[in-house]
Amino acid sequence: MRKVPDPFLIFDLDGTLLDTLADLGASVNAALAELGAPGHPLPAYRDFVGAGVRELVRRALPADRRGAEELARGIALTRAEYARRCLDQTRPYPGVAALLDALARRRVTMAILSNKPHDFTTRLVAALLPPLFAAVVGARPEVPHKPDPTAALAIAAALGRAPAECLFVGDSGIDIDTARNAGMRPIGVAWGFRPAEELRDHGAAAVLDRPEELLALLER
């Protein structure tokens, strides 16, 4: 793998930098209970998350209760529950803080792009990660969600970087597809919510087992 000169890194958030699964699962289960619907064991949420709050709630609802009205109510309840508990158990993955510090010392430009709603994305980043990112972007109604490349390309353009200079780092097939759709280098992380096989199947150029491996990758 050739060395990427002066790289620019775009990170996914959930499952990549932050382990948010417990708070997400608890929030959706609380919303489901309010709706009189059954909840799910925490591991099930590994497959539910990643495509935005609407799809998260749709997947969690029973198949016969996914109409527009109930889905809208489920989304509203989930947002309210998550606003109360989003910082209860969420933490950076082990090694992430040291990785970000090392990247900052090397003057690597970094950004975050998440399918989490923008208000929650900025809240979690401000509370749990160091202020090292040139851009922090979550899901907004006017911009298509990942794997559409629009937001990733806009971040790169705003920071004066060509897509080919960018590494997109994430834990899901959605992230790998986003990178490929944007003409960026797709890097998968195996410590998140999805299995390494999914990342490879979607075309990851590399799959990392530990955060510090990203430093070694940049030096190749």
Image (spheres, grey):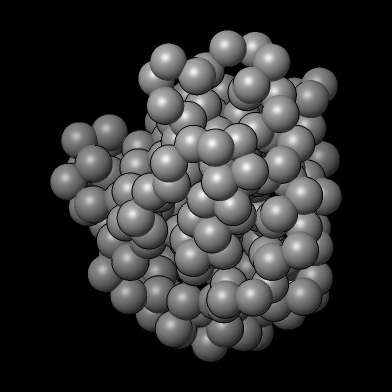
* Residue 76 picture quarter: top right
Residue 96 location (% of width, % of height): 51, 78
What residue is shown at x 71% (from left), y 29% (from top)? 73
Name the image quarter holding the C terminus. bottom left
Observer able to see residue 134: no
Residue 93 location (% of width, % of height): 47, 76
Horizontal side of 102 relative to 175 (left or right) equals right
Which residue reaches farthest top? Answer: 67
* Count of numbered marks: 0
Q: Is residue 65 above or below residue 13?
A: above
What residue is shown at x 82% (from left), y 50% (from top)? 119
Observer able to see residue 125: yes
Horizontal side of 1 relative to 167 (left or right) equals left
Q: Nearer the viewer, residue 176 or 49?
A: 49
Q: Nearer the viewer, residue 13 or 187?
A: 13
What residue is shown at x 27% (from left), y 36% (from top)? 203
Q: Nearer the viewer, residue 65 or 178?
A: 65
Horizontal side of 82 relative to 57 (left or right) equals right
Name the image quarter holding the N terminus. bottom left
What residue is shown at x 29% (from left), y 61% (from top)? 190
Q: Is residue 123 above or below residue 105?
A: above
Residue 161 location (% of width, % of height): 69, 43
Horizontal side of 135 relative to 116 (left or right) equals right
Residue 156 location (% of width, % of height): 70, 41
